[in-house]
Amino acid sequence: MSDSEQILDLEKRFWEAADATAYQEDMTDQAVIVMEPAGFLTKQNAVEMAQQGNTGFTGVRLQDVKTIELNPDCAVIAYHGEGTSRQGKKTRSTVSSTYVRENGQWKLAMTTHQPWPEDKG
């Protein structure tokens, strides 16, 4: 599996994560998540939210994916993503994430989610 495929799989894992495992295993200790309206979140915040059942989407679609390898141990992925929360709310965002390779494994270092406005039609 290529690095791009591994990173895309990790992104989908984060979207679908219904428990804290993905956040504990696949994020750097200093990772930052920028997601409105929540604001800035740390790895610990993400783990706590998952433990409370506040994470996980179904029907996840990642499209228009662009991956850029900055160097052999750092890559950026950008895409449009959508899914339905466990609470039944549809979410659509433009996402960009930065990954670093630690001990041979890709880890999320930073991600930003820019929500799309809701369809009015």
Image: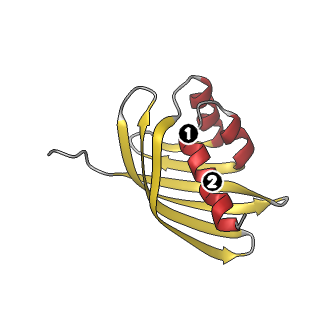
Residue at 62 percent of width and 25 percent of height: 51
Residue 8 quadrant: bottom right
Q: Which residue is mark 1?
A: 16
Distance from the alpha carbon under mark 1 to that under mark 2: 11 Å
- Mark number, residue 9: 2
Residue type (three-letter) at the residue carrying disc 2: Asp
Image coords of residue 94 (percent x, y): 41, 57
Residue at 35 percent of width and 38 percent of height: 90
Instruction: Give the farthest residue toward the bottom.
Output: 71
Report the quarter where the N terminus lies.
bottom right
Residue at 74 percent of width and 74 percent of height: 72
Residue at 71 percent of width and 55 percent of height: 107
N-term mark: 1 or 2: 2
Q: Are marks 1 and 2 in contact (CB under 8 Å)?
A: no
In the image, is residue 113 above or below residue 101? above
61 or 40: nearer the viewer: 61
Image coords of residue 4 (percent x, y): 64, 66
Q: Secondary structure at mark 2?
A: helix
15 or 29: nearer the viewer: 15
Residue type (three-letter) at the residue carrying disc 1: Glu
Residue 52 falls left or right of residue 90 = right
Q: Secondary structure at mark 1?
A: helix
Q: Dot 1, how many residues are within 10 Å of its Cα: few (below 14), some (14-19), or many (20+)?
A: many
Total numbered labels: 2
Instruction: Give the farthest residue toward the right.
Output: 103
Image coords of residue 81 (percent x, y): 43, 52
